[in-house]
Image: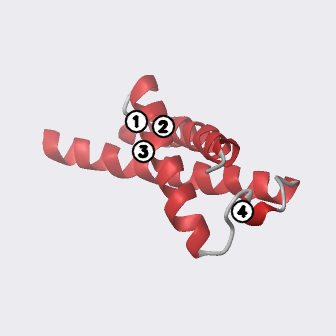
Amino acid sequence: MDLLPLIIQLIGGALGGVGAGKAMPSSSLGSMGNIISGLVGGAGAGQLLLPMLGMAAGGGGEGLDIMSIISGLIGGGAGGGILTVVIGLIKNAMAK
């Protein structure tokens, strides 16, 4: 297993989590919570969702090109942002 695509997805996830927290302050988990949920969501989306869509970062032994880096960042960012918002909504619903 190559670690570079995973690191790219984690970075994208962390950025997506922070971005989602800033875009939806009512669902924010705090700075560290947004980063952690973004990391988990980025890794999950990057390792599970992207290969199903045929967009695995760095797959196939063909090296790490710019498109695989971009797809890893976008996929990780989307997964991180979505998971951050979902956890924030669940947290708010349980607090009521």
Closer to the camera in the image, 61 or 74:
61
Asked whether the beta carbons under mark 2 and mark 3 sit within 8 Å of each other, the answer is yes
Mark 1 is on which residue type?
A: Ser
Q: Nearer the viewer, mark 1 or mark 4?
A: 4
Gap in Å between the C-alphas at discs 4 and 2? 31 Å
Gap in Å between the C-alphas at discs 1 and 4? 33 Å
| 1 or 3: tag closer to the N-terminus | 1
Q: Position of residue 26 (x, y in %)?
A: 37, 39
Mark 2 is on which residue type?
A: Gly
Mark 3 is on which residue type?
A: Thr
In the displayed structure, would residue 91 be above or below residue 64?
Answer: above
The residue to which callout 2 is attached is 21
Secondary structure state at the residue bearing disc 2: helix
Q: Residue at x 37, y 41 (%)?
A: 27
Report the number of numbered marks.
4
Asked whether the beta carbons under mark 4 and mark 2 sit within 8 Å of each other, the answer is no
Closer to the camera in the image, 82 or 62:
62
The residue to which callout 4 is attached is 59
Q: Residue at x 63, y 39 (%)?
A: 7
| 2 or 1: tag closer to the N-terminus | 2
Q: Nearer the viewer, mark 1 or mark 3?
A: 3
Gap in Å between the C-alphas at discs 1 and 3? 7 Å
Secondary structure state at the residue bearing disc 4: helix
Asked whether the beta carbons under mark 2 and mark 1 sit within 8 Å of each other, the answer is yes
Find residue 13 and name its label.
Answer: none
In the displayed structure, would residue 39 be above or below residue 70?
Answer: above
Secondary structure state at the residue bearing disc 3: helix
The residue to which callout 1 is attached is 28
